[in-house]
Image (cartoon, helix red, strand yellow):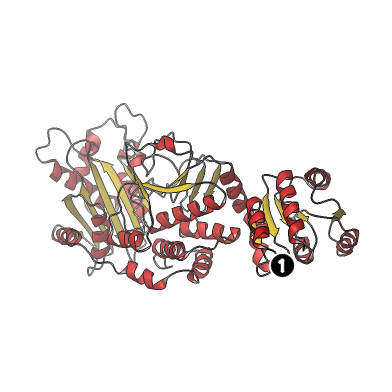
Amino acid sequence: MTSRLVLGCGTFGRRLALELGDRREPLLVLDGDAGRVEGLRDESIRAEQAETTDPEVIDRRAADLLDGVETVIVGGDDPAENRAVARAGREAFPEAFLLAYTGQGPTPADRAALGEVADRVVDEGTATAETLGRPIREVGYRTRRLRRVLRSLSGPLAVVAHDNPDPDAISSAFALARIAETAGIEAEVCYYGEINHQENRAFVNLLEYDLTALGPDSDLDRFGSFALVDHSRPGVNDGLPPETEVSVVIDHHPPREPVEAEFVDLRSNVGATSTLLTGYLRDLGIEPDRGLATGLLFGIRVDTDDFSREVDPEDFRAAAYLLSYADTATLERIESPSMDSETMDAIATAIGNREVRDDVLVTCLGEVSDRDALAQAADRLLDLEGIAVTFVFGFTGVDEESVVYASARARGTDLDLGEALRDAFGQVGSAGGHADMAGAQLPVGMLIDEDDEDPGDVIEDVVTERFFDALGVGPNRAATAVYARGDYIGTAEEYRVPGDGDAGSGRESDADPRSDERGEGRDDSDRNA
């Protein structure tokens, strides 16, 4: 249970103590004035007279009356005294969330001094119980914990988005970098892969986001610590070594395996990671600049499909908060980018190669250099009359080191695409996603034999039939050959690759480009699959 300590009982401190005193969490007020202390006691507030500028006195009195202190609130009226009280509070409780009131008529020097020791500084214009209720109530515990962890890290902090990042991952990474910098640690937004989708390129260019592209040869030793956003495990949907020690993880996808970090926030009830980061900004009183607010708002809109998919009330609250800071004209420009000729050609190829059974359309693009075209084709083909499900795939080559990428979409059906792709490909690769938007990534070496005369045709047949079979549409003739090439016992679901032992030996790090950790691969509303 959160314990709160109020140091100084001026106008603001008293008002806040009365607000917090109505709650069940432990509360203690320390003030040097006997009259103010007596007045609080008359209001049934636990208060004690003490020298609030002495850290030893503060620590001792709090230890006698509270079981630990999570939040320290500096609430006096005198700016100079509040500076001294804030320093004492920080020294006495270095791990606590410290909220400091400037006092009445503060100078710029007063504000700056408070900002050096406090997690949040409020003045007469913002110091209301309603405004401050969230960060000092139980719901603000994560915020306090995040700030505390960030303060303890070595810099620079690499804030790593998932491979081929989408707007939600990118804007979330920049929001976390901003929070880290206010906590005194230098931060750098990083990613592996490419940003190919026209909308995502427009997003980065118009908002002037400066990201660092990492590769296999990047010097990771120059970073003092690592954070992950919009995914949760190093080496799974990013290029980091799997053994990388991660300090912070913030994601809105449930994990399949335990996530290890000093700070972990995994909340699958919300529709976007941007929603979570917006909450932290709001709790900490960090006003997003126009570019950051615009990016976060767009990230929420994209990941919730304009608030129509997996949306939570918190997504609406975050969007409402961001709207007053965002540039709506820039949003319109991001949402209407031009389509390049390569993508148009890919969509044309997808239409020409399509195979339709019932209301399910499957098409192979053959060898592809831009995997983002798969997702765009899957989106566009869903508009064809009589089509409820689309599945578009291609491969990077036909040798054993190549990869098959796939994107799937559904509309107006009870089918759960994420589960369907896991059923079809989870034993030989990485697959998963949402009910209406999902993806897969498969090693070509699991699909072909060195004796195959035309491996491209084999890949197309195997993947096509496996998907149709998972949906209960048509036979599974070609896919049976996949399991004949390995060592299996009983059914295909028990399939094993010789020497690997566990089922599903496809590398989890080959996830389709964003990992929701439910299937270690997904093609989400980032349209970047």
Badge count: 1
Q: Residue at x 17, y 53 (%)?
A: 365
> Which residue, as the protein is rendered here, is positioned at the far left?
453
- Residue 320: x percent and y percent? 51, 70
- Residue 323: x percent and y percent? 48, 70
Q: For residue 105, which quarter of the picture?
A: bottom right
Amino acid, disc 1 = Gly
State the residue in front, 502 or 279. 279
- SS for callout 1: loop
Q: Residue at x 18, y 42 (%)?
A: 397
Q: Is residue 114 left or right of residue 266?
A: right
State the residue in front, 444 or 355. 444
- Residue 473: x percent and y percent? 25, 55
Q: Is residue 110 left or right of residue 498?
A: right
Q: Is residue 265 left or right of residue 359?
A: right
- Residue 386: x percent and y percent? 23, 68
Res. 4 in view:
no
Other residues around mark 1 within 10 Å, as few (<14) / some (14–19) / many (≥20): few
State the residue in front, 18 or 206. 206
Q: Which residue is mark 1?
A: 105
> Which residue, as the protein is rendered here, is positioned at the far top?
499
Q: For residue 285, which quarter of the picture?
A: bottom right
Q: Is residue 419 above or below residue 491?
A: below
Q: Is residue 374 above or below residue 153?
A: below
State the residue in front, 322 or 471. 322
